[in-house]
Structure formats: structure tokens, C-alpha cells
Image (spheres, rainbow, N blue to C red):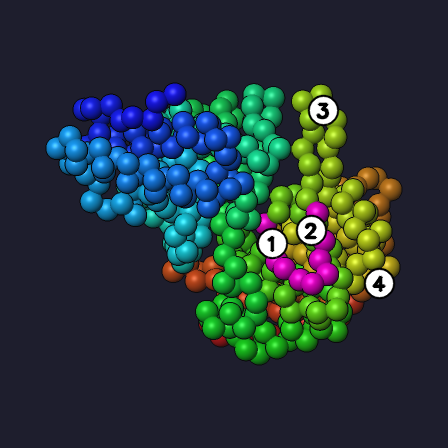
Amino acid sequence: MSLAYAPGRSGGPTASTTAVVAERVRERLRAERTDPARDPELAMRIVHAEVRRHNDFALARGLAPVDDEDACVREVLASVAGYGPLQAYLDDPTVEELWINAPDRIYVARGGVSERVPLALTDAAVRDLVERMLHATGRRVDLSQPFVDASLPDGSRLHVVIPDITRRHWSVNVRKFLPAYRDLDRLVEAGSVEPAAAALLRGAMGSGRSILVSGATHAGKTTLLGALIAACPPHHRIVTVEETFELGVEAADLVALQGRQPSLEGTGEVSLRRLVKEALRMRPDRLVVGEVRDAEALDLLLALNTGVPGAATIHANSAREALSKLAALPLLAGRNIDAGFVVPAVAASVHLVAHCERDDSGRRRVVEIVEPVGVRDGAIDARTLYLAAA
């Protein structure tokens, strides 16, 4: 195998130069049996060496060298070990989310506001990127499984839908993990939580009360839930349950569980309901469900009724609507589940509901905290403990 650069193929700091250097790097990685994901430092050294090699060759042949070696190194690494032209956006700490509607319609969100980026791919390039993202997850997407949720190595959540569920192109969404806002003090500094609300929530977590976080999509529910987990006493054993790892929180005594899709044979699925039951066997001081949206609400409710404090998120338009929804979801578990049991159980087991909203400017904040106080006329009654200024 020759690593010499072919005359006429190299040039200045262009896409073709990056492609040539990237191919040489891939040849060396294959020859040395190196996985750049497992040994990033060695991959970095190889890329640096090949960029310098390219410049030495260019100078000897009178060709234009790469002026910005560091930029070329970043581009080659993104091509070889990262996610190609998307890597710069995924590395950008201001980007919260990235999505692809079509190869030439790619968007990012910064500060809750979306913008189209000047990037155009091909259908084949999008498929290749998705395959790379899924490579280490053990998950798949194909005609028999046209949806997939997975966690990327940095904790970001990947969601993909393919045709013929979509009309023509693959739909890709990457929701990034932003650790900077995973504690209440940081959220207060960012203006997402008022100090009074933060003190109320911190005290509730410290005293072992159960908290439900509600809001619409992209309202900041998962971020707030992560901050609440960080507010738990350090000696608490925390077990988190998610469809795909997204919370990305750290604690001294924490176990994170995620569900599993069925295999090609339709076996091996692990549902949220199963995970909640398994979590209760792990001696949790706090059970956390990333998002409640189906019959797993019954298992969570039963856990809360046994004295295990909980925390979870739920989609709802208000804090009181969140309580009503949590009381309705357990009915999906079967006909033998009676609302006469569920409604009082929710009122007794959920101590606080923190509701999040995102305004037109993209700002996310906690706007209301309510406390259930009982049942009135068959519905959960609640009082408002905190209401943000308009």
C-alpha cells in the first residue's frame, strides 16, 4: 500500500485537498488497525503527520500548500472520525439542536431560535452520516424499522425517520447535551429559573419530595430535570430510566438505564415499563423517568405510592393539565385500571409540578409551580406556590 500523494490531485486548502488527506489517513488507520473512536490521540497524530506530509509534497512539487494546517486537521478528523460537515455545528457550544429536513435544508437552533445553515449534502452523504452515528449504538434503521432513537457518544440524542414514512428524504434530528445548564444555580444565572423558584425546587429535592416537570416540546423540561437531579443530596442513590440516554447527569451513586428496540426477529425489546420495575429492585432513593407518555405512568405511580420519591417530565400545556394527563395515562395499561384509584393516587404521590415555557424569542423559563392538595369533583385540585412575572 502506497501513501505517496499523486501529482495533480492536491492543491490549496480546498475540499478536494481535505478529501485526499482524509483518504491517506484512512489508509494508515486501516494499515495500523486503529479505530479513531477508541484511540483519538493516535488518530490526531496521524492526521497531523499526513497534513504535514501533504505540505512537504506540495512545496517540493511547486503546488499550493495548506496555509491553515490546524483547520485542515479539524476537517480531516471530522471526515475520518467525526460526522463530516456536521461536526463543526455539533462542536459549537451555542448550538442546542441540529436537524436535516433534506440534504440541502439543514437547520440548527441557538438560544431556542432556529436558523438555516449554508450547507448542502447529498442523500448518500446523509445516509452515510446516520450509519456512522448508529455504528456504536447497536441500533438500526431500515424498512422494517423506519424510526430510530439513539444516544451519541457525547450524550446527544439522535432521532431518524426514513422513507416511505417521510415523503422523500431522511429526516435527522440531533438534540445536543449541554452540561453547562445542568444545575439550578446555572439556570438562575441564565434567567431560566428565578431564585425563589430554585430555592423551592432545591428544598423539595433535598427533602425527598416527588416533582413532575411539564411543558411543551423544547421548553427546557429535560434540562430542568437534570438540574433537579443535581440538587439531590450527595448520598442518595439515583436510578434514571429513559428510552434513550439524554439526561447525561453525573452523581456519586447513579445508575442510568435505557430501553432497547426489538431485534430483527422481533425479540429482545426492553420497554420503559420493564425498566421502571427493574429500577425498583435496585434500592433507589430517587427514581427518575426521563419522559412519561404511555402506560409506564402506572408503574411510576405505583412506585411513588410505595414511598420511593420520583421525578419525571411530561408534555403538557400547564402544570394543572400535567396532573390531569398523569392521571389519564395509567388507564392505557389495561381495562382493570380504574380512575377512582389513579386520580387520588396522583394527588397524594406528586408533591410539586414545575411548568416550563419557551417564548417567541426562544427564552426558556419556569413559569409556574403548583402543589396538589387533594381531589375535588373527581379532579385533582392544586394550589399555586410560584408564578413568574409576565
Disc 2 or 4, which lies upstream in sequence? 2
Q: Main secondary structure of the magenta part?
A: loop
Q: Nearer the viewer, mark 4 or mark 1?
A: 1
Per the rendering, the mark at residue 256 is 2
Q: Residues within 10 Å of mark 4 (few under 14, many from 20)?
A: some
- Residue 162's spot in the image, x, y percent? 50, 27
Separation of residues labelled 2 and 3 (CA atoms): 25 Å
Q: Nearer the viewer, mark 2 or mark 1?
A: 2
Q: Nearer the viewer, mark 2 or mark 3?
A: 2
Q: Nearer the viewer, residue 58 or 299?
A: 58
Q: From the image, tell me which residue sits under label 4.
A: 307
SS for callout 2: strand
Q: Residue at x 37, y 39 (%)?
A: 47
Q: In the rendered structure, which amino acid carries the disc numbered 3?
A: Gly
SS for callout 4: loop
Q: In the rendered structure, which amino acid carries the disc numbered 2?
A: Ala
Q: Nearer the viewer, mark 2 or mark 4?
A: 2
Question: Is 27 inside the magenta-drawn segment?
Answer: no
Q: From the image, tell me which residue sits under label 1.
A: 247
Separation of residues labelled 4 and 3 (CA atoms): 36 Å
Q: Residue at x 72, y 53 (%)?
A: 255
Write down the quadrant of residue 251 in the picture.
Answer: bottom right
Separation of residues labelled 4 and 1 (CA atoms): 23 Å
The magenta segment is 246-257
Disc 1 or 3, which lies upstream in sequence? 1
Disc 2 or 1, which lies upstream in sequence? 1
